[in-house]
Structures are given as C-alpha cells and as structure tokens.
Amino acid sequence: MKQSAFAELHGVSRKTVTKWKERGWLVFAGDEVDVEASNVNLKRYRRDGIGSVTQSVTQDGKVTAKRATKKSVTATDAEVTVRADETPARAAERILAATGMELDFDEARCMKENYLALLNQLEYDQKSGLVVAVADVAKAVGEEYAKVRTKLLAIPAEQAPAIHRLRTVLEVQDALQEMIVHALEELTRDGVGGTA
C-alpha cells in the first residue's frame, strides 16, 4: 500500500505518515507500506495506539483496508461556554470529553501547546486588567447605579425647604437643575478617587 493510501486508511495527513516513517514506525515491503507490521508498530509506539483497521483481499488479489470511522458526540463548531462553576481548564476537559475528539499524538501535542498558550494569555490578560469577569462588571455597575439612585432620591428631602421659598416655576426649574448637576458632579468625583 502506498503512503498516501496508508494516510487515508488511518484518517491522517500525508505529513503525519511521513513523520511516522521518519520515526521508524512504518515497515516497508519494497516501496509499499506493510500495513499489518506498521499497524503493530503504531499500536506499540503511539500513545493512543490506532483505531480499528480491517484488511481484506479483493478478487483480483489487491489488498484493501478499511478504517472504522469515529463520530463525535457534538458538533465541533458548537459555541464554547465557560460555566460559572468551572475554570477554563475544566471547561476544556468537558468540551473535549463531549466532542469525542480523537487526534494522533502530534496533533494532540500541537493542540495542547496552543491551548496552554491561550490559557496563559487569558490569565495574563485577567491579571493585567484587560479581561474582567462579567459578574464583577455587573456588580460594580449595580453599585454605581445604587449610589446614583440614593443621591437623587435624597434631593427632595434635602432641598424642599429651599425650593419652597422660590416664587416662580423658572426659579424652581433652575434650582432643581442646579441640584441635580451638583449631585451628579459629586458622584463623578467619588468615582475618580474621592470618597462619599
């Protein structure tokens, strides 16, 4: 069997078969790959062995082989979600377990290195403040809205005596405008670094 057919048989790229050849995992009979002997080596040297491969001889004497196809449980393009009760590492484990992803050793190592690089980048971004948790942002915004609400609701009680002395609607409007602007400016100063 030619190397390209062997790659197709195992569902891997030609480059992967070339790597197997360089590592001495393939056995050749002349220019052709000895499927049975090579499968024994792959089973021995690859971390996860090999998938089931069956070989048969056709009526004209040619050797053919079939690889058992593996199906994933979920679509690989499904949206990735990190649940509230799990870390990114646990989410990755959950997703890999659900998708039934099956890779050869080199592909798995490459995926692992990419995963670790992305995880390190995410952790760096979190520590540097470039990425924050949505729950933290929602909590901070809620606290700020509570301060604004409290400040604005306190205006009538604090300012009613001053407004009572005013005589025209325009004076009341100007006074209310001034009080609201003053309250908002005070809240803005608090957010910049002052204290309430």
Image: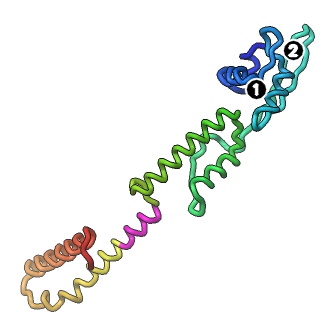
Residue type beneath disc 2 = Val
Q: Amino acid at mark 1?
A: His
SS class of the residue under badge 1? helix
Between 113 and 84, the one nearer to me in the picture: 113
Q: Secondary structure at mark 2?
A: strand
Question: Marks 1/2: CA distance?
Answer: 15 Å
- Residue 85, can we see it? yes
Q: Residue 139 lies in magenta, yes or no?
A: yes
| Residue 49 included in the magenta stretch of the image | no
Q: Is residue 29 above or below residue 88?
A: above
- Residue at image point 37% right, 67% down: 141
Per the rendering, the mark at residue 63 is 2
Q: Check if mark 1's residue and mark 2's residue have beta carbons within 8 Å.
A: no
Question: Is most of the magenta stretch helix, strand or loop?
Answer: helix
| Stretch in magenta | 134-143
In the displayed structure, 4 sits above or below 196; it is above
Q: Residue at x 71, y 38 (%)?
A: 102
Identify which residue is drawn at 10% across, 76% down. 174
Q: Is residue 65 left or right of residue 178?
A: right
Q: Along the line of sight, which residue is nearer the eye, 69 or 14?
A: 14
Disc 1: which residue? 10
